[in-house]
Amino acid sequence: MEKFAFLQDQLDALQAEDLLRTLRCIRSAPGPTAMVDGDSRGKVNFCSNNYLNIAADPHVAQAVSQAVRQWGYGASASRLICGTMGPHVEVEERFAAFVGKEACIMFPSGWMANEAVLRTIPQKGDLVLMDKADHASIIDAAKAGEATFRTWRRDNPDRLRKLLAGGDYRRRFIVTESVFPWTATQPTLSCWSS
């Protein structure tokens, strides 16, 4: 398999630079602490999206269990075909009312939300300006859309001003994050602590 030897070379290079990422198996319910791989000691979990440990809340578990018994598991289709079910509509209506808006749509992940927004709202002839440290989902979504995109760094507002002033674009969108879990100079970070 010499024709694929370049893949091993790439893996070796990542390993040498301490940039090789590997899967880690969680052996406990995800929460503020978790059992990782074969380690018998719990580790503090700094990388989960379960920030408030809501996934382990007994009320949430009971509601999910009841919903599965009533509605089954999964939507069985995309929302546009026949996958929009009563609970989807109810939670979106309740959330829209909560934030005082006409309507809302919820996505299963931030990645999907970024894809939906950045691939549909900015159009050909528009400019999307992204912070270089934006999450990969933002970058991938902007690249997949029809708008032109450029990057800037939040520590260089002059470049942003120049990009906003230049070019013949219909609309300009500035896309950035409120919290940057990664930085352009720190591509990997440890998410676990003993």
Image: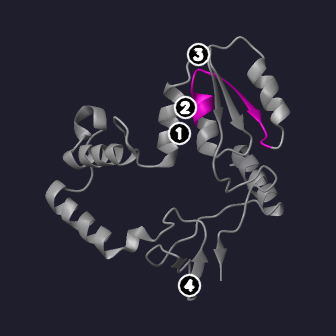
Q: 10 Å neighbourhood of mark 3: few (<14), some, or many (≥20)?
A: few
Q: Which residue is mark 4?
A: 42
Residue 70: give x, y in percent of width and height.
14, 58
Amino acid type assigned to the residue bearing label 1 in the image: Asn
Q: CA distance from mark 1 to mark 3?
A: 17 Å
Assign a secondary structure to mark 3: loop
Compared with 16, 42 (above or below) is below
Q: Which residue is mark 2?
A: 118
Amino acid type assigned to the residue bearing label 2 in the image: Leu
Left/right of residue 87 with respect to residue 36 in the rendered view: left
Q: Which residue is mark 1?
A: 114
Residue lying at the far top of the rendered structure: 168
Q: Which mark is residue 124?
A: 3
Q: Earlier in the sequence, mark 2 or mark 4?
A: 4
Which residue occupies 52% across, 45% down? Answer: 111
Q: Which residues are magenta?
A: 141-154
Q: Earlier in the sequence, mark 1 or mark 3?
A: 1
Amino acid type assigned to the residue bearing label 4 in the image: Gly
Q: Nearer the viewer, mark 2 or mark 4?
A: 2
Left/right of residue 85 with respect to residue 116 in the rendered view: left
Closer to the camera, 98 or 140?
Answer: 98
Q: CA distance from mark 1 to mark 2?
A: 6 Å
Q: Earlier in the sequence, mark 2 or mark 3?
A: 2
